[in-house]
Image: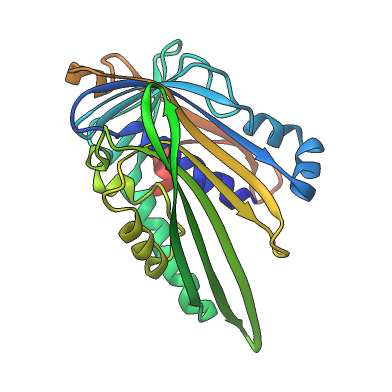
Amino acid sequence: MKRTIRTFGIALLMTAATIAQAGVIYSARTQTEMYGEAAEQQKQNPMLQQMLQPQEMKIFAQDKGGRIKFLSDSMLYKKGDFMVTEDGSIMYICDPQAKTYHKLDLKAMKGQAEGMMKTMTKMTKMSYSNVFVNLLDKGNAGTIAGYPVRKYRLLVEYDTNMKILFKKIKNHERREFFIYVTPKLPMSLVPEYNSSQMFTTGVEQVDSQIQSKLKGLGFPMKTEQLSYGKNNELTSKSTFEITSIQEKSLNPALFKLPIGYTEKEIRVEGTDSEGNTEKHKFKMGDLFK
């Protein structure tokens, strides 16, 4: 459940950060709902409740650059905080009140994730089978933010096979997406490296089929991702929806780290070999070096 939320959250933010080759300004909101046992866990976990609060944001995007301004508080961001990226490779998470930032190397993060996946595949002799990717046209679905949209259902299923020592483990994965796209804006507005993050499983042989199915559909104005448990029960639904959009040429300075901001250090308390308390300082970007 946590993996699904985290993966979808990263995908949404990257989508929002770099979405257009021509300038656009738009507002959007995200929301995640939990069901069944997952919903019960959410009720008992205040931290999870806070993480899953609906969020609103305003996005400025042009070419490969993007700026996201958060319009509501969350566990990860304060209202008024913003993220900027010039090309989608380096992202800065900025606090305008303190004039500080955290730096994230998105390419390094992706490389680490891919490396971990390869290592896990070797260690557990992981393989995938029974891959099924199906796209169904559900027809016209009215308008979103003034644009006519067509609704599609994308169903993704596959088996994960692992061998740990002498034990074989097989899991069935099922993900379902409802995608509302407008033909008035082309899918090419979303850069290739970013669109590959929108509907992804991390499994190359699955993701290649997904991208093939989605090619040429149009611009996604709203997406819904449904996740399922071991018994095929619905566990969560995450939604990203554009509420207003305006095409406009933007100043490239919007996508640069503001002058005068300093990189913020994170302080963590720990203990030395003798049990004495000591404080450690590090920068978020150091986690991905």
Q: Residue 230 falls in which quadrant of the image?
A: bottom right
Residue drawn at (25%, 48%), measured in percent from left and top?
Answer: 192
82, 159: nearer the viewer: 159
Residue 104, relative to residue 58: is it above or below?
Answer: below
| Colour pattern of the rendering | rainbow
108, 241: nearer the viewer: 241
Residue drawn at (69%, 59%), measured in percent from left and top?
Answer: 229
Query: Number of callouts in the render?
Result: 0
Residue 132, relative to residue 22: is it above or below?
Answer: below
Residue drawn at (59%, 49%), measured in percent from left and top?
Answer: 226
110, 188: nearer the viewer: 188
Residue drawn at (54%, 37%), measured in percent from left and top?
Answer: 239
Tell me if I can see residue 289 in this picture.
no
Q: Residue furthest top?
A: 97
Q: Residue 173 falls in which quadrant of the image?
A: bottom right
Q: Position of residue 125 (x, y in %)?
A: 51, 81
Give the side of residue 1 with respect to residue 157, left or right.
right
Tell me if I can see residue 182 in this picture.
yes
Q: Position of residue 4 (x, y in %)?
A: 57, 50
Residue 246, relative to residue 142: is it above or below?
Answer: above
241, 58: nearer the viewer: 241
Residue 105, relative to residue 30: is it above or below?
Answer: below
Q: Position of residue 7 (x, y in %)?
A: 50, 48
Q: Position of residue 238 (x, y in %)?
A: 57, 40
Q: Residue 83 falls in which quadrant of the image?
A: top left
Q: Residue furthest front?
A: 139
